[in-house]
Structures are given as structure tokens and as C-alpha cells.
Amino acid sequence: MPLNDKIAAFEAGAVAGRRQNYSHTGLYTYALRIARTPPVNVHITKVGYKPTRHTTALLDALDVAEAMEEGPERDSAVASAFEAIYADEHAPLGLARRTLKSTRNQPTTINWSGSICDMAAYAVLCIGAGVARIERLNGNDPAEPGDRLVEVSDSAACSDRIDEWIAVNAPGVMQVKFDANGMHTFAIEKVCGREGGRLGFRIYQSYQGKYRLSDFLGLSNCRDLVEGSNLYGNKQKTASWAAVTEAANTFGNGKRLSQEEFVSEVKPILCGMVGDGVDNLGSLIGVASEPGSPVARSADKILLVICDRIDPTRFNANYEGFISGVGVSGGFVDLNAVAAG
């Protein structure tokens, strides 16, 4: 199935064979759009790069292409505009640039975000809560009740903070950031069809040099691309791709986890990292342990960026604001942003 058709099917809820408890409400539709079309303006701001006049012209050409009527001509124009940006030696797109260059012979309808884990998490939080609210929260200056940055350094504290978030029976978002033999971060959406309704949870993530948000959401058959190209300067090994596939099948692909599944399958991994360590972290984040690395992976602390409540009626406006890049400041939330609590 062509990628654009596949995305349309996802957005319409028409993909057959997905796991049960699958839903198309909430932030998922917007995450699909971010996975398909990289937020170039946001990326450039976050890496602290001031584009040259030449790069600005390339970005303007991308805006023109994206404004075209949907269809093959638009797909081709957008793909060409992206390739021109990623081919520009002055463009600060690093891994994303090499990703596209390594697959330049693939169908022109394939466009995706890079593999920066901070970008995927930041995008989800901004679409859920709005850029201004998340920028303030990342600076430890919460704008609304229930917004907070929390650092946890033991299992009990981690469990309590997650339980407090779950106890607010309303849509919400949380970012989890840690260094467990490798820095990583991802976003969790708390889905609730109505105030006081049954909760569900979705995970959104990418991993630098390993996989993209589009891979985790099931939009791309990346294994063939990865094994056939020099992606990120290193060929993905089959064992590494198996870890990505396991994580996507269990926690990704848009699956809506029930509260029981989230509490029994995800929460113990997070709490265990700041406890005695866990040997199944790879099953959640899609990265196999490197040879010689500790089996049990642990973290000294986890940073939780928490919004107890978000308003689904604002998602579209938040998305438009996010992709515009307006109000986005440089840098992502720092793992050392707050004192332990």
C-alpha cells in the first residue's frame, strides 16, 4: 500500500489486523503527520542554528510545495524540497539529512521526521498542551495547575508520581527522560474520551541513530531501507531491528494500552530503572543491549515532564502553532532541570 494511502487508512481507522484496543482519537492523528513531515522549522530552532539566506530560500520552497493541492505533483515537489534541504551542506539537519540521502532512490512519497528522541517527545507535548505552555514547563515555570517538572531517584517516588498523573481522570501528557546506559526520552499520552471516562495510554518515541517516529508508529517498512543502506553511517544489524520491531508491536503502532496494561507492563520498567535496574528496558524503547553492556539497565534519576490535563479541542490549533515554529526556543528539556522530589 502506498504510504499516503496507508496514512489515510490509519487516520480513518481502517487498517485491518491491528491489535485490539486500538483507537484513533487523541494525539495519534497529529503524531502521524509529524512522522510523515519533519518539523523543519522547529528542528532548526532547537539545534540553535541560524539559517543562511540560501537555506532560508530552500525552506521557503518547501512552504510553497506543501501549500500545493494534494496529489502526486505535491508529493514529488515536497520530496524534492526536502532533498534539497538535506543536501545543503549548511543545513543543520544532521541525522535527518543523512537518512534521506541514504534512501534517495525510494518512492518520493516517503517523507519522515528524523530520529531525534527529544524532537518526537517535544512535538507530542506541544501538540497536546501548546508550545507556550511546554516552553514554560521546560523552564520549570509551570503555567497551569497540574503542570510540573519532577525528578525521581527511587522506585517508590517514581511510582507515586505516575499514580498521581493517572489519578487525574482526564486527557494528559507526560515526557520521560533518563540515562540508563544511554540517554533517551519519550512521550506518553493519557487518552480519555470524556471527563471521567475509561483511560488509555499511547507511547510515542524515536531513538537517535536507531529508528524514527515513523518506524515506531508503523508507517514505514524500514527494515529493507536500513539493511540496504548506510543509514546514520552504520548498517543496522538484524538483532537491532528485531528490538525495534518488538517495541513497536508491543507498545507502538498507535496501540492504545489499557490502564491495566500500562500499570503492569510500562510502569514497572520505569520504576525498576531507578530501583535495582531492569533487564527488559529494550522491549520498551526498542534498543537491544550492546555486547558487553550490563544486562540490568539502571538510571540514577528520571525526569518527568507532566501535564495532568490537556484539552483535545485545542489539538489542531496547537499543531498549527507547533509546525509554524513560532514561540519555540532553543534546546530541549534538561535532565538536570530540577532538584530531586
Image: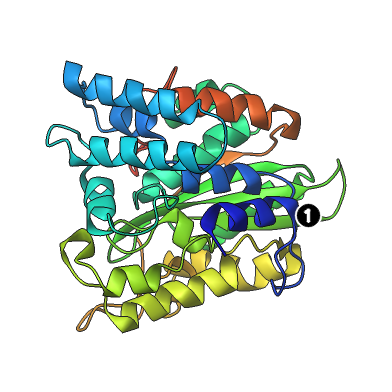
> Foreground residue, 168 or 247?
247
Q: Report the side of 73 relative to 103 (left or right).
A: right
- The one nearer the camera, 102 or 248, is 102
Residue 202 in the image, given as x and y percentages of width and height: 63, 56
- Identify the residue at horizontal 21%, vertical 26% (top origin): 49
Residue 269 visible from this viewpoint: yes
Q: Position of residue 42 (x, y in %)?
A: 38, 30
Q: Nearer the viewer, residue 76 or 225?
A: 76
Q: Amino acid at mark 1?
A: Leu
241 up-or-down from 69: above or below: below
Q: Residue furthest left?
A: 89
Q: Residues within 10 Å of mark 1 (few under 14, many from 20)?
A: many
Secondary structure at badge 1 equals: strand
Work out whether residue 276 can be spotted: no
Task: Name which residue lies at 33% across and 83% down.
Answer: 239
Residue identified by numbered label 1: 199
Q: Picture quarter containing residue 16?
A: bottom right
Most foreground residue, 214 or 133: 214
State which quarter of the image contains the N terminus: bottom right
Vertical arrangement, residue 173 with respect to residue 59, above or below: below
> Which residue occupies 48% across, 48% down?
35
Residue 203 in picture, x, y percent from top left? 57, 57
319 sits left or right of 200 in the view: left
Q: Position of residue 324 (x, y in %)?
A: 46, 22
Give the residue at x 45% y 28%: 140
> Which quarter of the picture shows residue 144?
top right
